[in-house]
Image (cartoon, rainbow, N blue to C red):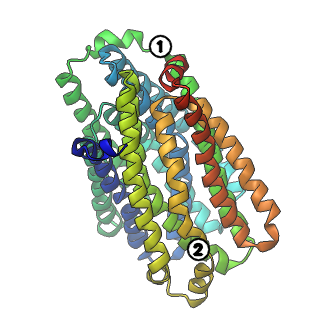
Amino acid sequence: MFKALRDMSLHRQVFALALPMVLSNITVPLLGLVDAAVIGHLDYAWYLGGVAVGGTMINVTFWLLGFLRMATTGLSAQAYGASDKDAQASVFLQGLAMAWLLALLLIVFHQPVASLIFQFSSASAEVKVYAEQYFSIRIWGAPAALGNLVIMGWLLGTQNARHPMWLLIITNVVNIALDVLFVIGFGWKVQGAAAASVLAEYSGLMLGLWFVSRQWLAAALPSVREKIGTVRNGMGRLLRLNRDIFLRSLCLQLSFTFMTFQGATLGDDVVAANAVLMSFLMLVSYAMDGFAYAMEAMVGKAIGARNREALGRSLIGTTFWSLIISLAIMVAFAGFGRDIIGLISNIPAVQAEAAKYLPWLSAVPLVAMWCFLLDGIFIGATRGREMRNSMFVAICVFFAVWWGLSAYGNHALWAAMLAFMGMRGLGLAVIFAYQWHKDIFLEAASANN
């Protein structure tokens, strides 16, 4: 292990994949802040409420379909490691075909789905009107948004993190610029914010396809015309993997949604404090996602090449830097958490409430890093079934801990979230450790495919 850590080329490889994704992830919350600032300066609060509710609906929808990126990353990384040009081409075309089919279904059925969701919303009539308006425009960006997931996954799988970074950054910068132009310049209000996002997504799609075409030609992959007739071959494998990752993502979303809604039953100060602390949790996610992406690409490449030594080096290098980053975030939360809370909210009651649960959050980075890294390992190995099953166990643990400690109010929710993160990592760690010890991880991954 120490020999691998002394190899500077390993560290450069990790950061070449992880750092661009961490940097590009920073633009995601920045976009949300600009949206809030632009819409928040309009005359009535329901404009901002409508964008918030409609934006949440569309973001959750696209997030649940994030399996398109994950599956594409793992499969393309394995094809890249095996130097299989036919497979690299097929993975991209299959992913894009599936993305556009799902986008078509979303567009066709978005009205009844939106109506059903809004029936369960307690938002005011004005907020619902503008939320539906926002959602009905944003949904037309689905072909671009889902296509961009596939493009990012394919580029990452082929060990290219620079282009996905620029794809995210440029898309979000275009979105911000159009936000200001449409909402403030043209006075289009909620429709302007939605239209800005749709046009930005399509600009990202065009840029992404250009990046893919450059890499496609440089790698001398088979022409699209040659491969288009074979897109259906092997589609069953992609469908199974996507199904398992989707169910895993659904459980993950269930835990966050439950925490939000259950916190709301404990009072306004609690739900506001949780919102502040959850923004910290998202910061951890953005930081750790970059290293998880690096793990996916490196592990998939090593498995495709059937190279146990390269796989071991990937695990050591990525784990080392993830641990360093996690410890740094944990120290920052523990030492400066109250100051950071003060920057987000100036309401004394919310500050005091959030400070009560800060110790729980301070432990999250060190506990959560393992589930992020192990997710990366199993995505790179395209082992969706294990991810799904371990997530089922973790969500059961989440509800069991919350129910057992429910007398302690919000402490029970944070204890459940910490246990959930820990169990996600532990479940996958047990499976991985067993297969690694038995020297069957590469064989098992191959058999799974």
**Above or below, 115 relative to 401:** above
Query: Badge 2: how crowded within 10 Å, few (<14), some, or many (20+)?
Result: some
Q: Determine crowd level at label 1: few under 14, some 14-19, many 20+ residues with C-alpha closer than 10 A.
A: few
Residue 116 is marked as none
Q: Quadrant of residue 76?
A: top left
Q: Amino acid at mark 2?
A: Pro
Q: Is residue 267 left or right of residue 227?
A: right
Q: Dot 1 lies on which element? A: loop
How far from the left and from the top, in percent, is residue 403? Answer: 81, 60
The relative height of residue 153 versus residue 265 in the rendered view (above or below) is above
Dot 1 amino acid type: Arg
Q: Position of residue 117 (x, y in %)?
A: 67, 51
Residue 349 drawn at (x, y percent): 61, 88
Query: Circle 2 sits in a helix, a strand or a loop, which is it?
Result: helix
Q: Do tag 2 and tag 1 residues touch (Cβ < 8 Å)?
A: no
Please tell me the numbered disc located at residue 232.
1
Q: Nearer the viewer, residue 180 or 424?
A: 424
Residue at image point 41% right, 77% down: 41
> Seen in the image, is 328 located left or right of residue 400?
left
Question: N-terminal of the two: label 2 or label 1?
Answer: 1
Outermost residue to the front: 2
Q: Residue at x 39, y 9 (%)?
A: 229
Q: Which residue is painted at 38% across and 51% down in the image?
A: 320
Using the rendered image of the protein, determine whether residue 106 is visible from the camera's viewpoint: yes
Identify residue for label 2: 359
Q: Which residue is more in the foreground, 347 or 189?
A: 347
> In the displayed structure, would residue 358 be above or below residue 209?
below
In the image, 145 versus 212, the foreground residue is 212
Quadrant occupied by the N terminus: top left
Q: Nearer the viewer, residue 96 or 124?
A: 96
